[in-house]
Amino acid sequence: MTAEVQTVHQIDDAGVDLDPAALLELYWQMVRARRIDERTWVLHRQGKIAFHISGIGHEAIQVGAAYAMRRGHDYAHLYYRDLAFALALGYTPRDFYLAVFGKLGEPTSGARQMPSHFTGRAQGMLPPSSPVATQVPQAAGVALACKLRGQDRVTVVTLGEGSTSEGDFFEGLNWAGVHILPMICLVQNNIYAISVPMEKQMAVANVADRAPMFGIAAAIVDGNDVLASYRVMKEAIERARGGGGATLVEAKTYRPVPHSSDDDDRTYRSRDEVDEWKRHDPILRYQIYLRERGLLDDQKIEDVEARARQEIDEAQANALAAPYPPAEDALGPVFKPLHD
Ligand SMILES: Cc1ncc(C[n+]2csc(CCOP(=O)(O)OP(=O)(O)O)c2C)c(N)n1
Ligand SMILES: [Mg+2]
């Protein structure tokens, strides 16, 4: 008999000024992202889609970060695990399913790009490339352009801890330090790069320990605590907006599912390790906190679940019903619209 897993439930709300409606909005964003993600795993296992790369476990840091930004004004250069981040910025479940099914009307690339390359002009989401860490120098370029134009836009760029082994990470942050750029580099440290553990990527304890070599600020946060994540990102973003330069933020988190639908994580980590991390599930932790504050009860939790189910069902049905692009579209440029 296995003992019931007890959720770790501390949430650090010190200095967080969000009203009850905003606190519940963060909960909604985390839950909807989780449910969309879970549904997508099911679609893959049913053989209905070719590939899924999941953000499960990373919802707190992503939603906290998105809400710390001026959404639609600041720039976000996201990576493939940022489903919750993209949704919180205004990317829609329908956008996601059009990409996942490869259907006509997919807003990023007309379905020529892989799914989870979150892009959108309205949301300020820059088009990511598939080689990891290339977004860091690109984001530094965007932040420099904003600075030269006298705009008060901040650029938030995200990546995993394994990707910080790439030269692009060092070059981009060096540039951010030299030019005192309005940029936040958010590393979502889930301690694995596919099967490679963190200690095989770096000889320092924290990614953030490297910030002094670039002359930029550093912060480490519990990335499974949505309010702590929000606060730390907000501080960094406001410092950048005020001319104080870049910050390297490291969010400690975990990926309780395989790297992607092509990975079998049983080959490189124990089930005990995964179960231990599930005790830190960001949604369950926050749910306990909201219950204690009297903002959630069983009925309200079910209402959120029902709302998420309806939204997902509609988005999935809508994308399924959409036609495939004409075959010759595959030969077109990735980002130039052919039909819009
Ligand atoms: C330059 C480059 N090398 C290898 C890959 C293949 N690859 C895709 S994701 C990934 C792991 C990255 O791990 P991490 O940065 O820790 O992010 P996580 O997936 O854990 O969120 C690798 C090696 C790639 N996309 N680009
Ligand atoms: Mg990782």
Image (tube, rainbow, N blue to C red):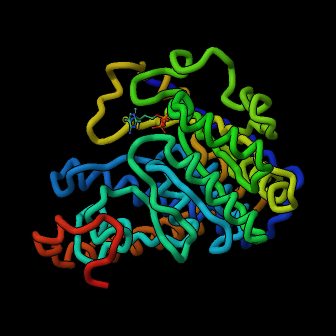
The residue positioned 80% from the left and 30% from the top of the image is 212
Tell which of 58 and 243 is nearer to you: 243
* Residue 278 in sight: no
Q: Percent from the top left, x then y, of residue 136? A: 58, 46
Using the rendered view, name the quadrant where residue 213 is placed.
top right
Q: Quadrant of the C terminus?
A: bottom left
Q: Percent from the top left, x then y, of residue 332? A: 22, 68
Q: Quadrant of the N terminus?
A: top left
Tell which of 32 and 216 is nearer to you: 216
Task: Identify whether 194 is placed above or below 146.
Answer: above
Task: Identify whether 273 is placed above or below 339.
Answer: above
107 sits to left or right of 191:
left
Tell which of 206 and 328 is nearer to you: 328
The residue positioned 49% from the left and 50% from the top of the image is 79
Q: Percent from the top left, x then y, of residue 38? A: 37, 52
* Residue 73 in sight: yes
213 sits to left or right of 78:
right
Q: Residue furthest bottom?
A: 340
Using the rendered view, name the quadrant where residue 230 is placed.
bottom right
The residue positioned 70% from the left and 66% from the top of the image is 146
Task: Identify whether 253 is placed above or below 34.
Answer: above
